[in-house]
Image (cartoon, rainbow, N blue to C red):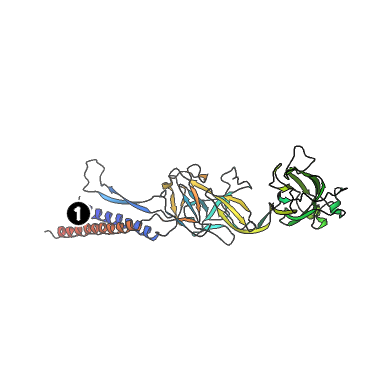
């Protein structure tokens, strides 16, 4: 190797170690960056000749920065339900624009918060994308049908009542009312032996009162009427009762049949509320469960004062949006103030044949490259994709102690390369002074 060659080799060492210093500096600067993947400096020789003579006296050096994108960072808990982390393989699918699926980017930085429109966006301005789902949580058949995750579009939710369960007792010694005809209690010609009003919920989230009235008409036999106690014009025809029937009990006080016209015996009856067209309400049938046949788990007939011990009604009043939850399968579920919930989106996880071949872009994200292969959009916990952890973030994979060690060794190598340059320069000076 000539003196000029030695000087060039020293310069190559300066350049390579400068790059290594830049890699270590970048790692240290991003030690607190969510989802950041530490880079490593890889050195390789650069020979002046490829003759195969095995002479490495003229070997220079070149540095390459590589990033281990597939490495898993430590998950740390947070207090925000929209902070997300992936445990295992894959990336969140994001876009620079909330309404666009062009030029998608992929990231492990899950520090998402709603913007002014309610779209989930991380600290670098990337919008989280997902599949809109139907009421059953089914994702679209076209897995490329993505949209920005929005947590404000749902104003509220109500649910109509479909079932009611009664736990009550009708006093066995109650006197029999002779000559009762269906509708007499609603008309006021017969006084009920027992009567209670229970609210049900209509399709628009309103509370509607149904009155259940009972009268004893024979041994172990009771007749009942169900009347609507709200605004009369809400139902058509605007007359009560809306349901009548007769029930019977066994000699031991247990329920024999909730509807004596039914064979075999049943434990529940169906009450259809005839909503008028002017009410704007959807048709509604409520199944009233009076208990299990030959059991005492519902309405009974014992020698104890008639009383309603409890009732349960499904459905709910209108409730406004209270927040969202995201589960390990990626479902984004809206929570409402009335206790109801609704699945609205499902988050895809993008996996790649070679994730380390992705191209890094600003914002701690990655773009598809020819080395990475095309993305495969999978549901969480399927197809090699990891699970999603809400209220958690993935920490940077930077080892701070290791990076400080790299700084020291890089500085020493840089100083040594500089000494090569100065030594070669001094030898050239001596050569020029020869006479």
Observer-nearest of 48 and 408: 408
- Image point 74% across, 50% down: which residue? 303
Residue 201 visible from this viewpoint: no
Q: Secondary structure at mark 1?
A: helix
- Image point 33% across, 57% down: which residue? 403
Observer-nearest of 152 and 10: 152
Position above or below: 21 against 142: below
Say whether residue 282 is left or right of residue 71: right
**Residue 64 image offset from top left, x and y in percent:** 34, 51
Residue situated furthest top in the rendering: 264
Residue 116 visible from this viewpoint: yes
Q: Quadrant of residue 278?
A: bottom right
**Residue 33 image offset from top left, x and y in percent:** 43, 59
**Residue 163 image offset from top left, x and y in percent:** 71, 48
- Image point 58% across, 43% down: which residue? 142
Position above or below: 251 against 230: above
> For mark 1, does the 10 Å Cα neighbourhood hold few (<14), some (14 to 19), or many (20 or more) residues?
some
Say whether residue 182 is left or right of residue 384: right
**Residue 37 image offset from top left, x and y in percent:** 41, 53
Say whether residue 158 is left or right of residue 377: right
Observer-nearest of 49 and 409: 409
Residue situated furthest bottom in the rendering: 116
The quadrant of the picture occupied by the C terminus is bottom left
Say whether residue 251 is left or right of residue 35: right
Q: Which residue is mark 1?
A: 3
């Amino acid at each position: 190797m000539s003196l000029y060659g030695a000087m060039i080799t020293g310069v190559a060492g300066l350049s390579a170690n400068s790059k290594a210093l830049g890699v270590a500096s970048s790692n240290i600067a991003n030690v607190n960056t969510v989802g950041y993947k530490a880079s490593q400096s890889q050195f390789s020789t650069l020979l002046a000749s490829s003759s195969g003579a095995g002479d490495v006296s003229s070997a220079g050096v070149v540095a390459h920065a590589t990033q281990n994108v597939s490495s898993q960072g430590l998950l740390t808990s947070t207090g925000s339900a929209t902070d997300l982390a992936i445990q295992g393989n894959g990336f969140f699918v994001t876009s620079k624009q909330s309404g666009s699926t062009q030029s998608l980017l992929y990231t492990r930085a899950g520090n998402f918060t709603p913007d002014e429109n309610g779209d989930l966006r991380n600290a670098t301005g990337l919008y989280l994308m997902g599949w809109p789902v139907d009421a059953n949580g089914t994702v679209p058949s076209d897995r490329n049908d993505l949209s920005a995750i929005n947590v404000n579009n749902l104003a509220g939710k109500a649910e109509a009542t479909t079932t009611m369960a009664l736990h009550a007792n009708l006093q066995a010694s109650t006197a029999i009312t002779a000559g009762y005809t269906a509708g007499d209690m609603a008309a006021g010609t017969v006084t009920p032996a027992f009567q209670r009003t229970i609210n049900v919920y209509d399709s628009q989230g309103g509370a509607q009162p149904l009155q259940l009235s009972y009268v004893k008409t024979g041994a172990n036999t009771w007749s009942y009427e169900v009347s609507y106690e709200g605004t009369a014009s809400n139902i058509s025809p605007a007359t009560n009762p809306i349901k009548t029937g007769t029930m019977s009990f066994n000699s031991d006080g247990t329920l024999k049949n909730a509807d004596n016209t039914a064979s075999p015996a049943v434990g529940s009856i169906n009450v259809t509320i005839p909503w008028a067209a002017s009410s704007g309400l959807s048709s509604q049938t409520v199944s009233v469960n009076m208990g299990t046949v030959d059991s005492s788990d519902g309405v009974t007939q014992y020698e104890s004062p008639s009383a309603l011990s409890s009732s349960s009604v499904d459905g709910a009043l209108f409730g406004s949006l209270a927040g969202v939850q995201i589960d390990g399968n990626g479902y984004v579920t809206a929570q409402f103030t009335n206790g109801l919930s609704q699945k609205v989106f499902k988050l895809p996880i993008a996996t790649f044949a070679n994730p380390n071949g992705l191209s890094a872009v600003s914002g701690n994200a990655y773009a598809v490259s020819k080395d990475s292969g095309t993305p495969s959009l999978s549901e969480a916990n399927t197809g090699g994709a990891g699970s999603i952890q809400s209220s958690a973030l993935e920490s940077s994979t930077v080892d701070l102690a290791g990076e400080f060690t790299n700084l020291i060794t890089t500085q020493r190598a840089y100083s040594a390369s500089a000494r090569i340059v100065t030594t070669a320069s001094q030898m050239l000076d001596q050569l020029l002074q020869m006479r």
